[in-house]
Amino acid sequence: RRRCGGALQDVLGLRSAHREGEAAGALRIHFVIDESVCKAFEDEVFSGMLRRGSCDSASGPWAAELRSAIVDGFGRLLRPSLEREWRRRLKESAEDDAFDTYRRNLHAKLLTPPLRLHPQWGEAAAGG
C-alpha cells in the first residue's frame, strides 16, 4: 500500500465519514460518470454487437431496440453495479486506514516507557 499525505489524506479521511452521514440520513453520495464516457461505452457495445451479427445493420429494424436495450442496461444495471463496487473499495480502503492508524497508535503506546515517578503509579506510590 502506498502512503499519502496532505490534502489527499484529508480526502481519504472522508471515506468513513460519508458512510456515517449516509447511515444517519443526512447525506447521500453519488458517483458521476461523464456522459461522453457513457456514450462512448454504449457505442462500443453497439458496434461490438453489430460485428458479432446480433443485428443486421446499424439502420436495421432492430437496431433502435438494441441501442435502447444497451442504454437501459447500462443505466439500470451496470452503473449501479459500478457504484456498489466503488463503495466497497472505498469502505475497504477506509477500514485499512483505520486499522493502520490503530496499529500505529498501539505500537506507540506499547513502546512508551513506564511512568516510574508518577504519584499514583510506579515507584513513588510503592514508597521507593
Image (cartoon, helix red, strand yellow):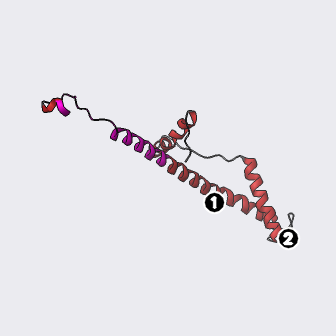
Q: Nearer the viewer, residue 74 or 4?
A: 4
Residue 37 can be seen, yes or no:
yes
Identify the residue at image location x=54%, y=40%: 12
Which numbered tag is attached to residue 56?
A: 2
Query: How far, Cα to Cα, is label 2 from label 1?
Result: 26 Å
Residues at badges 2 and 1 in contact (C-beta under 8 Å)?
no
Residue 122: quarter of image: top left
The amino acid pointed to by label 1 is Leu
Residue 120 can be seen, yes or no:
no
Numbered label tally: 2
Identify the residue at image location x=79%, y=57%: 43
Q: Is most of the magenta stretch helix, strand or loop? A: helix
Instruction: Examine the structure image and report whether residue 88 is included in the region drawn in magenta.
Output: no
Q: Which residue is mark 1?
A: 77
Which span of residues is magenta-colored?
94-123
Instruction: Examine the structure image and report whether residue 108 is included in the region drawn in magenta.
Output: yes
The amino acid pointed to by label 2 is Asp
